[in-house]
Image (cartoon, coloured by chain):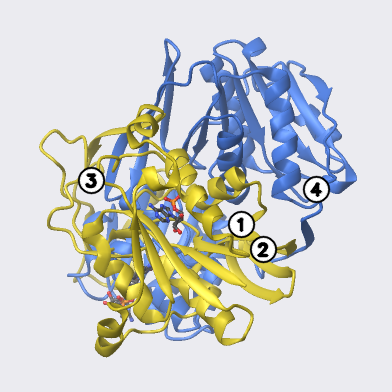
Chain colours: A blue, B yellow
Amino acid sequence: MKVLALIEQRHGKLRSSGFEALSLAAKLAGNSADAAGVLIGSNVSGLATECAGYGADKIYVADQPELGLYNVLHYAKALEQAIKNFQPDLVIATSSPIGRDLLPRLAIRFDSELLTDLVALEVSNGKITGKKPMFAGKTIADVELVELSGKPGFVSVRPNIFAIEKPGNGTASVEKLTVDVSDNRLKTIEIRKGASEKADLTEAQIIISGGRSLGSADNFKILQSCADVIGATVGASRAAVDAGFAPHSMQVGQTGKTVNPSLYIACGISGAIQHLAGMRTSKVIVAINSDEEAPIFSIADYGIVGDIFKAIPLMEAKFKELLGHDA
Amino acid sequence: MKALVLIKPTPDTEAKIMLTSDRKAIDHASTKFIINPYDEFAIEEALKLKEAGKLTEVVLCTFTSQTNKEVVVKGLAMGADRAIIIDNQGCESLDSANVARLLAAAVKAESPQIILGGKQAIDDDNMHVLTMVAEVLGLPHVNVVTKLEVNGETAKVEREVEGGQTEVYEVKLPVVLGAHKSLNSPRYTSLPGIMKARKKQCDVKTPADLGFDGAVLLAKNKAKFQNFQPPAEKPPGKVFKGEPLEDMVDKVVKLLRNEAKVI
Ligand SMILES: Cc1cc2nc3c(=O)[nH]c(=O)nc-3n(C[C@H](O)[C@H](O)[C@H](O)COP(=O)(O)OP(=O)(O)OC[C@H]3O[C@@H](n4cnc5c(N)ncnc54)[C@H](O)[C@@H]3O)c2cc1C
Ligand SMILES: Nc1ncnc2c1ncn2[C@@H]1O[C@H](COP(=O)(O)O)[C@@H](O)[C@H]1O
């Protein structure tokens, strides 16, 4: 099976989830000749060498000044071009803001369909199957693409689930794409930076989240200080966001981000179903809450019944001690 | 200038998920349905544009079961002018691409300048349909919209992406827009408002009215969903209580290092 992966970049930097998609493409293809990646942007040709060694022989590169800022109409054209040249059976991307924006257009353009945000993906005998959380994670469905009759199938996968595998130092050949960017109905004026320079919540390996009980935006600094020690990104519950303690971009849950870190520390968060929807697939969950009946404890691997204002600084000190000993 | 808002009735966020005995489908018989929460932001935004004199009409459109008429009435009670229900009887399980083809035909018949919807339906969690409608119609789209400003033939649109970043666009109308939570705060509906809304125009159409044969569309389905399972149960965790806080914190931090190996 021929598999094409979209390797995402922002501001000239490859996102780690792009390597996840590329590794997965190589694995599903079974041999490097049947796997390829596609890079879209401005001044991104140099990044193609960083994509070698992941098991894909070819990297398509669309490198034009007009592709510097993400624009769905132009990026869709670029991806369309790569698909036409490579003729894959399957196209995969990350279920990121860019991946989720592009693939529905391409699925229609190639008279095909799309499965989004899969947490498992397999191909056998030409069959594309996977697992998809639905209803905010309350159920997981077995999903399959059928009746493709030669058309490429489209899949986006959740970040932080599929392993990055770099089997060799092999080289990848680069094929340049020329993209028609004459469609000017949509113009990207700018991409405004967010408040935090930290790893994005959806890609973070460790997240410390705070709830309503933090009481103020200022108190979120307690979390930030602890987060800095272990390289964590700070998240928030909706109640904390609605109260103005944290910006909406930090919200975890059904109407916020779906996160999947290796460690999620919930501080003073009750564990409402809509919050769990966004973080229940975290590999290890720690809950700190003064109410031992709080639902968050039902999905926690480790829990502390106690006051966050005392527990978080203590935890920060312990982390420092632990990591300090290592140094 | 007209706005068409695509709305999808979805199970209430609190609803338990019941499965049919063969696990092939979700059993909705006893589920309360609401307007997909993101679609409420879309309706609100259209109403605000109308109140600002930038639109003359707000039309709701949904592909759903006629039994969800009350959900549509709630949207009318918010202030929409009229609604179109495309009855999904016999083709309840159409995949996203097919739903988009149907909705695109309905949009085309109305030729609105602004097509709004939610960024994502909270049942399938797909984020497909609006973008697909835009592609079928050959229109630009912006999804996950957090700010909208309509100025005559163009709109300035902001969209939230990863890392708290915001993409800022200028787009020519007509355009398809997917609403995010922080776009606005949807208004409440009153009981008298709902009574009045029941009298508003609500046309029921079939796929055939839009030029489609439901059976043919079904046969073209390419996405298959089956065997719904609950998420894997976790074994109960180690919850510490009643000990000195410092000891409990110490234990958990050590477990994170030695047992879970995540620090
Ligand atoms: C359609 C819809 C979508 C939603 N989407 C989201 C979403 O995306 N994300 C989300 O998070 N929520 C979402 N919600 C809201 C959700 O239902 C909850 O209201 C919210 O998650 C509660 O936030 P919280 O846990 O911070 O606050 P609370 O539920 O008020 O919990 C506060 C907790 O802090 C504990 N506490 C208080 N003081 C201390 C202390 N000193 N030390 C330790 N613990 C303390 C309390 O015991 C309590 O458990 C949504 C709701 C709806 C209806
Ligand atoms: N059956 C439907 N009828 C009307 N609008 C829909 C339907 N399905 C999806 N939509 C619209 O498309 C958005 C995204 O849905 P989805 O792709 O299912 O996540 C929703 O928020 C609605 O605005």
Residue under label 2, please give it.
Answer: B165
Residue under label 1, please give it.
Answer: B162
- Of label 3 and label 2, which has the lower sequence position? 2
| Residue B165 appears in view | yes
| Residue A296 appears in view | no
Q: Are marks 2 and 1 in contact (CB under 8 Å)?
A: yes
Corner quadrant of residue A308: bottom left
> Looking at the image, is mark 3 or mark 2 nearer the viewer?
2
Q: Is residue A133 above or below residue B195?
A: above
Give the Cα separation between the discs numbered 1 and 3.
29 Å
Q: Position of residue A320 (x, y in %)?
A: 52, 61
Residue under label 4, please give it.
Answer: A183
For disc 4, the neighbor class at 10 Å (few under 14, some 14 to 19, many from 20) is few
Q: Are marks 1 and 3 in contact (CB under 8 Å)?
A: no
For disc 2, the neighbor class at 10 Å (few under 14, some 14 to 19, many from 20) is some
- On whether ligand 2 comes within 8 Å of the CB at mark 4, the answer is no
Give the residue drawn at x 50%, y 41%.
A160
Give the residue drawn at x 41%, y 72%.
B82
SS at mark 4?
Answer: loop
Residue under label 3, please give it.
Answer: B234
For disc 1, the neighbor class at 10 Å (few under 14, some 14 to 19, many from 20) is some
